[in-house]
Image (spheres, helix red, strand yellow):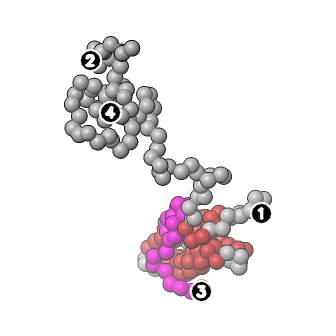
Amino acid sequence: MTEPPRPPGEGAAPGGGSNDPTAPFNPYGANEPTSGSTPPSSPPPPPGGYAPPPSGGYNPPPAGGYNPPPQYGGYNQAPAGSGLDDKNWILINHFGGAAGAFLGGGCSGWIVPLIVLLARGNQSPVVRAEAVKALNFQILWSIIALVGWATTCLVIGFIIGPVAWLIAIIFGVIAGVKASNNEPYNYPMTVQIIK
């Protein structure tokens, strides 16, 4: 028994074409001529969904998920319950230097970087490198601020002290923000006193 002919468009697959799996896909409808006799490289998507991925394409993630990308400078993540990790020490280092400069009139920004260097410098080369950078910067600007405050009897002292105070605070905060974004920061206007 033969099937009666269907009206145009009836029984066509969604998006055009026919239900015949050997017929080439025609996105313009069942009655439009196709531009070749070669079947397409992939079948049309199923109704209401996406086409299955081609062979050799998508691979599911490994069991346990993806490994996160390494952070800059190789921050060591502390094991659970062991205290602060390297990133937190570096944040304390830079923001503590800025806070010390703010509270001490520009003269005590070196205290927190020194504490960080002594407390964690031997255990983590990354923390040591950041603490040395902050310590060198804060020592230099603490000396400049101290000279500025000591010479306030001269007119130039009224300029040097507050400027050194502001520079120590501003660049300490900038370094802390960079460290919170996992970016290294080299202080400008510094000398290498501590190696």
Kindly indicate whether the residue at mark 4 contacts the one at mark 2 (C-beta within 8 angstroms): no
Question: How many C-alpha atoms fall within 10 Å of the one at disc 3: few (<14), some, or many (≥20)?
Answer: few
Kindly indicate whether the residue at mark 1 contacts the one at mark 4 (C-beta within 8 angstroms): no
Q: Residue 23 is drawn in which quadrant?
A: top left
Q: Amino acid at mark 3?
A: Lys
Badge 2 marks a residue whose secondary structure is loop
Residue 16, visible in the rendered structure: yes
Q: Please report the bounds of the magenta region as a residue range.
A: 170-195
Mark 4–mark 3 distance (CA, rounded to whole Å): 76 Å
Kindly identify the residue that appears in the image at 61 percent across and 53 percent down. Answer: 62
Which circle marks residue 82 in the picture?
Answer: 1
Q: Is residue 91 above or below residue 195?
A: above
Q: Is residue 64 above or below residue 136?
A: above
Q: Is residue 99 above or below residue 38?
A: below
Q: Position of residue 85 (x, y in %)?
A: 68, 64
Residue position for label 2: 8
Which marked residue is nearer to the observer: mark 2 or mark 4? 4
Residue position for label 3: 195
Q: Amino acid at mark 4?
A: Ala
Badge 4 marks a residue whose secondary structure is loop
Whichever of labels 2 and 1 marks the residue nearer the N terminus, that label is: 2
Q: Check if residue 123 falls in the magenta segment.
A: no
Q: Position of residue 73 (x, y in %)?
A: 57, 71
Kindly identify the residue that appears in the image at 59 percent across and 78 percent down. Answer: 129
Residue position for label 4: 23
Mark 2–mark 1 distance (CA, rounded to whole Å): 74 Å
Q: Residue 70 is drawn in which quadrant?
A: bottom right
In front: 95, or 46? 46
Q: Position of residue 74 (x, y in %)?
A: 60, 70
Mark 2–mark 3 distance (CA, rounded to whole Å): 85 Å
Residue 102, visible in the rendered structure: no
